[in-house]
Image: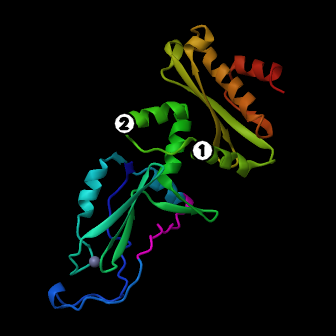
Amino acid sequence: MIIPMVQFGISDKDPGGQMPTSSPSSRAIPVIRVSVQPIAITPITIFENDLENRLKLPRVVCDEDCILQLLGKTCRYPFCWEEISVQKKHIGSTLTLQWHCKKFHQGSWSSAQCKSQNGYPFFINNLLFAASVFLSGNSFSKISLLCQFFRLNSISQSTFDRIQNAILADIGDRPVVLAGDGHCDSPGFSAKYCVYSLMDIATRKVVDVQFVGKRETELKSPRMEKLGLQRALTSIQKKIKVIELVTDASISISAMLSKDIT
Ligand SMILES: [Zn+2]
């Protein structure tokens, strides 16, 4: 799990709606019988510029037990010392906790902010996880394997694919102008790896990323960018309608675009 901050009790609820005023020993035990229903994590409204700031927050890796220690074993409601029952659930890289005591006090907590998108709630950590895999030029299966060894909860392959497809679905049939550029691990002729990205200029969303190794280009570093662009365009042209590409003024890339790409 990836934990941006720890805040317990932000959505604690008292079913009676009144604050207790006496100690447990002198207080009458409520006789009403109500079943404790699971509490839904309430999505909050996060505006686009605020979302950007939230995505930049530092994150830490934390043992699940350490979080449960913070929650404690007794009810957090004032003047209630009942033992609590905790249900935990993993939603992608996010941990959610729901607790209740015998006196029907209840609360919930999640390790990430929950945002509503087109009526569907999603945790921004899960979105960031998918984006991080994509933008670092990694394959999902490799990162997923790393998470398995590390015992780190991650989003599923289907969620990862769904997030990518949502970006392309937003574009739909609209003709797209793309900006492309390659980033190598080091400058000049000593680079071993290159990540080539294509971005939709209108929405500033990255629509494709390709990873190229020097061994694929006969150990010639300058050829990696061209191969990355070639792969990215071949892949993205099957999914969206590209009408224009903006890239740097490389002679080899200009030649390739005029010959190979239609
Ligand atoms: Zn309680």
Q: Nearer the viewer, residue 5 or 79?
A: 79
**Would you say 155 lies left or right of 29 here?**
right
**Would you say 153 lies left or right of 83 here?**
right
* Main secondary structure along the magenta-highlighted residues: loop
Q: How far from the left and from the top, in percent, is residue 193?
A: 53, 20
Indicate the quadrant where residue 85 lies.
bottom left
**Would you say 135 lies left or right of 253 here?**
left
Mark 2 CB near ligand 1 (8 Å cut): no
Q: How far from the left and from the top, in percent, is residue 172?
A: 77, 49
**Which three-letter amino acid code belongs to the residue tagged 1?**
Ser
Q: Secondary structure at mark 1?
A: helix
Neighbour tally class for label 1: few under 14, some 14-19, many 20 plus, Cα within 10 Å = few
Residue 42 versus residue 194 in the image, above or below: below
**Would you say 32 lies left or right of 197 here?**
left
Residue underneath mark 1: 158
* Separation of residues labelled 2 and 1 (CA atoms): 21 Å
Q: How far from the left and from the top, in percent, is residue 185?
A: 49, 23
Residue 157 versus residue 146 in the image, above or below: below
Indicate the quadrant where residue 259 lies.
top right
Q: Secondary structure at mark 2?
A: helix
**Which three-letter amino acid code belongs to the residue tagged 2?**
Phe
Mark 1 CB near ligand 1 (8 Å cut): no
